[in-house]
Every structure is written in C-alpha cells, then in structure tokens.
Image (cartoon, helix red, strand yellow):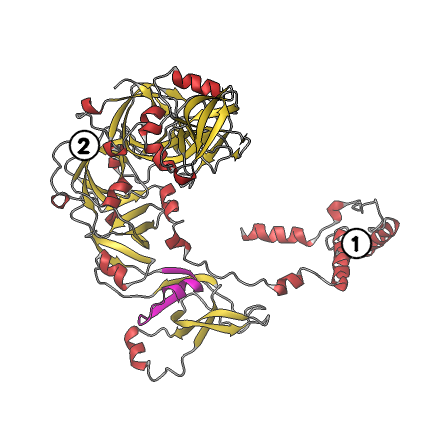
Amino acid sequence: MEPASLQDFVCALDPASLPRVLRVCSGVYFQGSIYEISGNECCLSTGDLIKVTQIRLQKVVCENPRTGQTMELAPNFQGCFSPLTGPQSYGTLEELVSAVTHSSKKLPVCFLSTHRITTDTRVVPEDEPLMLEAVETRFGTCCARCVLGTGAHRVILHLPLSQQGPFWEWKPGAPRTLLQALKDPAMRDLLLTCPTIPWRALILRPQYELQAIMHLRRTIVKIPSTLEVDVEDITATSQHVHFIQPLLLSEVLARGGPFPLPTEILEVPEGPPIFLSPWMGSLQKGERLCIYGLASPPWRVLVSTKGRKVPRHFMVSGAYQGKLRRRPREFSTAYDLLGALQPGRPLRVVATKDYEGEGVENSGFASLAVGDRLEVLRSGQAHGVQGRDVDVLVCQRLSDQTKEEEEEEEEEEAEDQEQVVLPLYFSGGFVEEMSDGRRYSLEDLTTQFSLPCEVKVVAKDTSHTADPLPSFPGLRLEEKITEPFLVVGLDSKPGMCFEIPPRWLDLTIVEAEGQPGPPAGFLPVATVEELTEAFYYHLRKLPAFESQTPPPRPPKRQGLSKQKQPSSKERGNKSSQVLEMQQPPLLPKAKKKTLPEVAKDRSNMYSKIPAHKKGLRPTKPDIQDPDDDEHDYEEIAEQFRNTV
C-alpha cells in the first residue's frame, strides 16, 4: 500500500478488517505537547508502528464549499443526504447542456436550481429536482424540455437555455442517512445536499478517533484521524511483530493471574523508599522478577519499638511464626483506659502519677496517688460545675491485698468498695496490672486482645533467619492493616522471596519470556519488613487511623481566668506593694549604741528625697564608719566558719 494521509486511510478503512498495523511515514509534533493533548496522542515519530484495533466516529464537520462556513453534526444527525455528481455549478442551462454534450454522459440528466424559477404557468421551488430530457426550438428560441415531478403528476416545462442558475447536476436515488452516506464509497468526495441544512451544497468531513496499541505503552493510545501524518499499511508483512505492552503491579493484582508470572522491571516509581530492606536496592530497571501470586493472609500489623529514644517501625505479616508474650500496657489518659476496656475482660491498672481531683473545676472527682490500684468499670457522665455534663470513667479503687485475697473477699466487701470517677480528659499515668505468662502467636494475640498492645517476642520466626523483633525489650502492636500483597522473587536472589504492596510500590513491568521459577511455597518469605519513617507516618494517615477519635479536650478553667483579672482594690494593693518594693532596702540591724543616731539620720534623709517623686531614685545613705556597723551577718559568717 502506498503512503496516505491518516484521514484518507481511516475514511477508506473497512472496520471489519481490523486490526491493522500501520507504520508512520512522516511524523508530526505539536509545540508544547510531549505526548497527549486532551487525552489524545499528538506526537508520532517517523517509523513508529501502530496497531489500530478500533475506530470510532466522533463528529462530522459539514462545510459549505462556496463560503467556507462549517458546522458540526452529531453522529446521530437525523437529516438525509443526496449526492450532487458535478464538482461545480453552472450559471445557465446552456452551460449545463454544453457540459453534458461534451462529456460521455447522455440525456436525460437530472439537475436542480438553488434559486426559485418562475415561468408563465408555474413556479419551480428552489432545490426542486428537474429532469432535462432534450433541447428543442420553441417559437424560435432554443429551450430545454424539462420534466417536473414523477408519475401522474409529471409537468412539462420549457425553459430557455439562457435561464439563470446556478444549477447543480445530481444523481437521482434514495436519500441516505448520515452514517449511510459516510459508509458508501460511491458518495465519498461528492457534493451533497440536505433539505434540513440551509446550504445548497455541502461537503461532509468526518472525524474519527483511532484506538491503537504502541510499543511500550501501558494504555490504549487514542489518535485523532485529523492528525497531519502519513501512514502505510504493513499488516501483511508484520505478522511477526509483537507489541510490548507494559503492566502495573496493580493491574496484575486486579486481573488475578495467571501465576507464576515471569516479568521484567521497566520503571520504578519515583520517591523515597518505603522499606529499609536489602531487596529494595535490587528493584531497578531491567531486573527480572517472578510474581508467584497473592500473599496469605492479607493482613499486616504495624509495630513500633519501645524503650528507645528513636523508635523503629515494622510491618509484620500475618504469617509471622514467632511467639509473643504480653507486657503491661501504659496509658496516659483516662480516655486511653476506656479504649482498652473490653467486655468480659477486667482491666486493672496502677497509678504512676499523683492527681488532685478536689479543684475548682474538678470538685467531686477523686484524687489519686502513686501506687493506687484501680479496676476500670465503665464510662458515664457526671454533672460539671459549669452546668454541663462531663464524660467520665468509672473505676473501682482496689486495696493492696493480693489477688487471691481479693477474690475471696470480693463478694463480701462489694458494697463497701469505693468508686472513683475520673474525667476522660484526665491526663495522668497508669500501667496495666497483669500476670499473663502465656505465649501467643500473632494471629491469636490480635484476635483475643484489642490494639494497641504491648508485647515482647520470646521466640523468633524460624523461617526468617534475620528476624529483628526478638532483640527489642518491648514492642507496641499499633494497628491491623488489611491490604493485598504480591509474593515476588528476584532472579538474581533465588533463595528469598518477599511481599510487595502494589498500592504503595506499583512497579511498571512487562511480561518476560522463559519458564517461571519454583512456587513460592518452597521458598522462605520475609514476614518482617522495617519501614522508613516517612512511610510510617504516611500509613498513620490512612482512614483506619483517621477513624480513631482524639481524646476530649479539658474544659477552660474559668477560675484561673477570673484570677487573672484582679479587682480594682486588688490592683490598688498590688500597686502599693510595687511602690514598697521600690523603696530603698533597709539597713542591716545595728547594735543598740548606734541605733538612735542611725535612725535619726535615716529619717532626715528620707524626708529630703521622697521615694515616690517622679524622675528621682532613692539613693543609698552614706555610712561614716562601716567598721563600727557590726550586724548579724558577721555573726552568722563567724559561726559558719567555726562549724566548718
């Protein structure tokens, strides 16, 4: 096939012959566009191969050939079209007859006028079809014998050859719909007429959208047929051409197989890494990996270390085989105690901070001291001092008896035990009182107890030789996350498999040739992955964490605010106190022999220089003989030296 414009190729294309493989003979580039404009491909290079899989009619541009005006027609346009066989119009009937006689055509021919024709007997409307049967001489004038209408309503008209037009030759036939006119090869490139369009003649220029596959393009490429590019159909000689179509891990996950699937990495998403594992550095372009399928179970647990200045964060798979032992939990607010309370499971804690409940705002709330033992009962409401109901936590104060003694006397002293009411906004410190020495699996622990939970790994996962969790004195199981992972193995490291979350690490891959590796069931899979700090806080923003409501804020303390606004009397007292503080300091206490003289001199001096006079400062009085002023400070210093 010879190269043709893309528009001509699409207009002549039979949709039943798809798919077709095209080669771009002359590329086109749009300035300011890299690949797409409005979702369509607008940058094709010379030599690119395109596999057209589908064409779709977008719209039809209707053009007036005389004025150049255009209008857009929807594909469901209801008007009918008839062809005009002549490519040009004729100014008079004589020009039309001359053109017919000098061509291979023979009379009769059909034509129409774009203007109304008035005769002695009737008026021929515009665009009314007429048939020119012969040329006759009538009353000494050459006339064209024309027939108007068909059947029994035929009317013979004799029109002089000098009759002014313009006239258009047309081919009689059944009117066609828009889609029929576009599909008929005989009507292509012809002038048409349509009664519902105000123009006498028109040209239809359809615009299609091609859906195609290109090399290394992950999605279907959409190309407008109006793109100014020449193409060549090479379908017959391109049976061996294989179009590489990239995939995302999320697409592999969505289609669900087949597994195992050998692939090759084409692109790694940009951004900081999410795991601190060694295999993260191996995820590079060109690396071959095998996808074995979905990881089971699909849930993970977010874990943080305890007892370190800089905590480390891990994501632990539900398949983790290590053994864990519960540790006492720590709570900083009464709201945290309420969140940890489970039906049927008693929660006993010990206070680690003092709390004074008999205050201006907390009247009626109990006080706590370090070491007080409490059993959390339920939530409730109490009447606050501001007339508002306050959410509280109802607890029961326990004695310092042992657990066995408490169980024996629990029924007898149930009525005498004291109930403690704490506001939920209470900020203090509690540690859980527990004596659970059992060893739990991760699945049992998350099923039986609510998170967060404090644990210690007492036996590592034997399938994970580099399990880092047993080395930490304490761990905090923070949240259970359900997210699908894919089990993946690297060809460069055949002895280990790991799990990748496509949601957060969506690699671009391509299916590779070759035999897949052994099933993942025969290879160890890493069940513990250390998270980067940035990815950890990204996980903390997930909806599962956002649903956790923050603890209630304590009410504003109006008592303190009132104290901050002293009355006028208090302000007066404070101002007098300030003036007194501005007075010169008193001299050290003198002995009796010098007391009258010093007091007299001092009174005379202060009467001359008042302390409150504006712009002046009180000066320190001069002492004539400081050696004679033996005061108490010297006696204290002497006693101190003797003691030392």
Q: Residue at x 21, y 57 (%)?
A: 441
Q: Is residue 197 visible?
A: yes
Q: Which residues are magenta?
A: 330-350
The amino acid type, in three-letter code, at marker 2 is Ala
Residue 261 in percent (x, y) is at 17, 38
Q: Of tags 1 and 2, which is closer to the observer?
A: 2
Asked if the magenta segment contains residue 344, the reply would be yes
Residue 96 versus residue 585 in the image, above or below: above
Q: Is residue 66 visible?
A: no
Q: Secondary structure at mark 1?
A: loop
Image quadrant in which you'd find residue 534: top left
Image quadrant in which you'd find residue 251: top left
Residue 355 in percent (x, y) is at 49, 65
Residue 512 disc label: 2
Q: Residue at x 83, y 45 (%)?
A: 616
Q: Is residue 74 left or right of residue 19?
A: right
CA gap, disc 1 and disc 2 = 110 Å
Q: Is residue 557 left or right of residue 512?
A: right
The amino acid type, in three-letter code, at marker 1 is Thr
Residue 359 in percent (x, y) is at 56, 68
